[in-house]
Structure formats: C-alpha cells, structure tokens
Image (cartoon, rainbow, N blue to C red):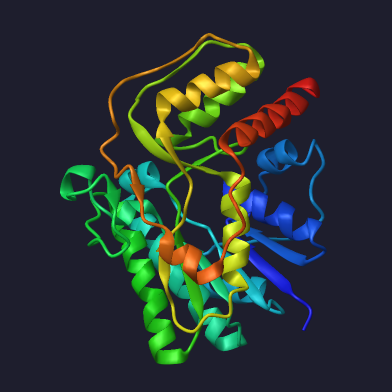
Amino acid sequence: MTERFLVTGANGCIGAWVVKQLLEQGVEVTAFDLKADEHRHLLINNGVMPKANWAFGDLTVAEDVEKAMAGATHVVHLAALQVPFCRANPALGANVNVVGTVNIFEAAKKLGVNNISHASSIAVFGLAADYPDEKLAHDAPRLPTTLYGVYKTAAEDVAKVYWNEYGIRSVGLRPHTVFGPGRDQGMTSQPSVAIEKAVLKEKFHVEYGGVLDFQYAPDVAAAFILAARANLEGAPVVNINGHTVGVSDFVEIVKTVSGFKDLSYGTTQLPVVYSADSQPWIDLASPPPLTKLEEAISNSIQIFSNSSSTI
C-alpha cells in the first residue's frame, strides 16, 4: 500500500523536519496545524515552501482531525502546547494535549489507521533530585512537575488504552533537549538560539549550564518517522537517545565551528533529569547512528547562514 502520512503540529520544529524528510522520500504528506506559519519551513528548506497537502484545523475539534486523517496510512502526532502555554492557560493546554490526542486515536479507530507515533516528553519524569542516578532508568516512575508533564503522562496512557481496547498500534517517543534550526521556543531552545546568534555575529548568553541530552532535530524527526513505520504490537513509550554533554561543551563547539567567540553560558544546572536510558528504543527500532554533535552544529550553522544571506 502506498504510504500517506498525516503530520500534526506540522509547523513546529520537529514537525517541519518530519514534513521535509517525508517529502524527500517521495511520500505523500498531509501537514496539519491550526493556521499557516511558514517561517520554520522556509528556514530549513532554503526559502522554499515544501509541497505538502496543507490542512488547517483545530486538534480539539474531532471533525477537523478526522477530515485531515482521511486517506492516511500513518500518523506522526506532534501537535501540543508547551510548558509556558499550559501554565498560562491550563484548560486550553489540557484540551489540546489530552483531548487532542484522544481525537487522533478516535479518528484512527474510525478510519482504520494503525501506525501512529506520538510525542511524549522527558517532562513526564520529575526533577533530577527525585531519582538516585544521573541517567534515568527506562522504567523510572513518572513524576511530572508541570501541567505539561501531567498532560503528556495522560496522553501516554491514552495510547495504551487504545491498544488494549481497540488494537491500535502506536509508539510514543520522549525527546529531551531538541536543538537545531527551527527550535526557537521554550527554555531549552537557548543553545539553538546561540547557534543562530553566532551566525548573525550577535552576542548571546545561555542562562544555564550543567548537562543536558542534546538531540538534533533532524535525528528526532527521523525517529518519529521510523516509529510510525515500526508495525509493533502494543503501545510502547520510550526515551530516545542523544548527546549527553555539558552546556559549556555545546557552546564551545558552536564558538569553534562558527569562529564567533562572543557567546557565554551560565553554571546552574536546570532541575530536569540529565538524560534517560534509551536502550529500549534502540532495541525496539534499531535506529541509524546519530549525527555527530560537531556535524549537527556545523549543519545548523550552514542552514542559518543560508537563511541570513537571503534576508
């Protein structure tokens, strides 16, 4: 059967990369989001909008979701409101992140779509101080400390119920610190902003330090595509792998590769877990090797450079 992918949250960072990669593979894509927003697509596609089937609608409206999913064979469900938006409007956050996920699975049940990957988050876990080890065990208890984390925990369990009751296969992935072109929102977007500022030759300070699990946006997008194609029985949710390094190391690589030295960083470790065991994901899907960190930063610099030259 010819693949047809529905990508929700298609205008977000990971969504834009998923759309780009699927189209490059010759796959038909329906790109679903609330409204038109071209800036990330233009950034990562050298100023050219990708030729997807654009579907604008509201994830919280079941009819919009079902209409967008019609004809799809696979779904990559990324649409969600992030931590600050959930904090500012808890009811809307719950509606988008939980009810929206229910609408995805309800539409899949009705339309017979049985290959879904969906975005959970490292935010389903607690603070680093809540766990005995710096690297979180794959079966560590979920102890969310934000509404966003609570909603993502609920969405993970929604997927499990739809497998248990209706046999709908899905794989949930929990990214950590996604970086690269298109990552321009959220506290952990600052290392990506540092790359862009280096290209623009503008002084920038990352407000924190410590260690994070850096995951290159194209690698994360490829993981969601792989997960949607996995044909696995059940509804597993797994952590994905990245480069666990210091923020200081990351910024120093940016400075070296870009040749711009006026970047700095703090010393305070963010209170999130540093990294999480991703071996179950590796065992599950045998993902390809990650892009090396220096190469990912170099690629990002090139993309930002191409964009700035066209302004």
**Position of residue 95 measured from the top left corner of the image (x, y, whole percent):** 39, 62
Q: Is residue 52 visible?
A: no
Nearer to the camera, 29 or 128:
128
Above-or-below relation of 259 to 231 = above
Residue 53: image location, x then y, percent = 77, 62
Q: Nearer the viewer, residue 249 or 67?
A: 249
Residue 213 lies in what quarter of the image? top left
Where residue 188 sits: x, y (%)? Answer: 42, 35
Q: Is residue 5 depicted above or below 96 in this figure?
A: below
Question: Which of the 4 image quadrants contains residue 231?
Answer: bottom right
Residue placed most toward the observer, 31 or 67? 31
Query: Which residue: 58% across, 48% down?
Result: 290
Q: x, y percentage for residue 119?
A: 48, 60
Give the tally of numbered discs.
0
Answer whether residue 25 is visible to the viewer in this image.
yes
Give the quadrant of the C terminus.
Answer: top right
Q: Is residue 25 left or right of residue 169?
A: right
Q: Quadrant of the N terminus?
A: bottom right
Residue 68 vertical placement versus 298 (above, below)? below
Residue for point 30% across, 34% down: 270
User: Residue at horizontal 39%, vertical 88%?
Assistant: 164
The image shows residue 69, relative to residue 135, as above or below, that is below
Residue at x 25%, y 54% (from the top left corner) = 144
Q: Quadrant of residue 6?
A: bottom right
